[in-house]
Amino acid sequence: DLETAIQITLEKNTALNVAKLEVDKSEEKLREASSGLFPNIDASGQYQRYIEKPVIFLPSGSPFGDVLEIGSNNSYFGAISASIPVFSLGLYNGIGIAAKNVELNSANLRFAEVSTIGDVKKVFYSVLLARELKDVIIQSLQNAMEQLENVTRLNKQGVVSDYELLRSELQVENLRPQVIQAENDYEIAKENLKVIIGLKSEQKINISGELDFNEQPSISEEQLFD
């Protein structure tokens, strides 16, 4: 039905999916630009292992001996630094541009959804119309065939002329290609519907719903601009 067609369109339509990706990408750009306002913390560390300790050679007779070892076998060093931007005009300009881009892509997505849903409705109703026309022509052919049977029977009885019989036969034969055309038009309309809602051509669909010709209430000028 129409609601299911719209739901599938919102999930599978290629143009809508592209518009959604553009919104996601612009939101990621905004988060990336905003990350410049966050504190920046850096940490570093260093470790050294001495195979032999550094030594100092002392004068002879020193109470510490001729060679004095200093330091230790292992050396450790660590540092942590933190920074936060106080003011950056370029940073705030970048955040503003990214935020506007999010608004623009979100508006484009809403426009694409409204436009696509409108197209789906038009195509869906064209499918219903094609189905109604097909059913009407098929019913006309069935009526013509029944009429031909009656005329044939009456012609054999001598009640109806050969001219009436020929006219009934022509009416049936003229309706046969119209039935084929109507059936083809209905299948083409369904294919168009599958394309716009994002289904593959090999997928089978059954159309449910009826054309509704109920008159809609008119909108006054005050309501339109309210």
Image (cartoon, helix red, strand yellow):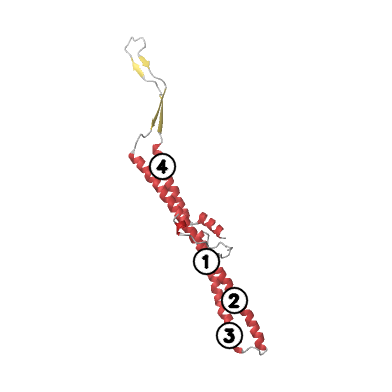
Q: Which residue is mark 4?
A: 32
In terms of secondary structure, where does tag 1 sit?
Answer: helix
Relative to 160, is 84 on the left or the right? left
The amino acid type, in three-letter code, at marker 1 is Ser
The amino acid type, in three-letter code, at marker 3 is Arg
Q: Is residue 10 visible?
A: yes
Residue 29 sits in quarter: top left
Relative to residue 45, is residue 185 depicted above or below?
below
In terms of secondary structure, where does tag 2 sit?
Answer: helix
The amino acid type, in three-letter code, at marker 2 is Ser
Q: Which residue is mark 3?
A: 167
Q: CA distance from mark 1 to mark 2?
A: 21 Å
Q: Quadrant of the C terminus?
A: bottom left
Asked if the residue under mark 3 is in contact with the one under mark 4, i.e. CB atoms within 8 Å, the reply is: no
Q: Position of residue 89 (x, y in %)?
A: 33, 39
Q: Residues within 10 Å of mark 1 (few under 14, many from 20)?
A: some
- Chain-order first, disc 2 or disc 3: 2
Residue at image location 59% in from the left, 74% down from the top: 138
Asked if the residue under mark 3 is in contact with the one under mark 2, i.e. CB atoms within 8 Å, the reply is: no
Q: Which mark is residue 168?
A: none
Residue 147 sits in quarter: bottom right
Q: CA distance from mark 3 to mark 1?
A: 33 Å
Q: Nearer the viewer, mark 4 or mark 3?
A: 3
Q: Position of residue 225 (x, y in %)?
A: 44, 56
Which one is in front, 210 or 49?
A: 210
Q: Which residue is mark 1?
A: 126
Q: Which residue is mark 2?
A: 140
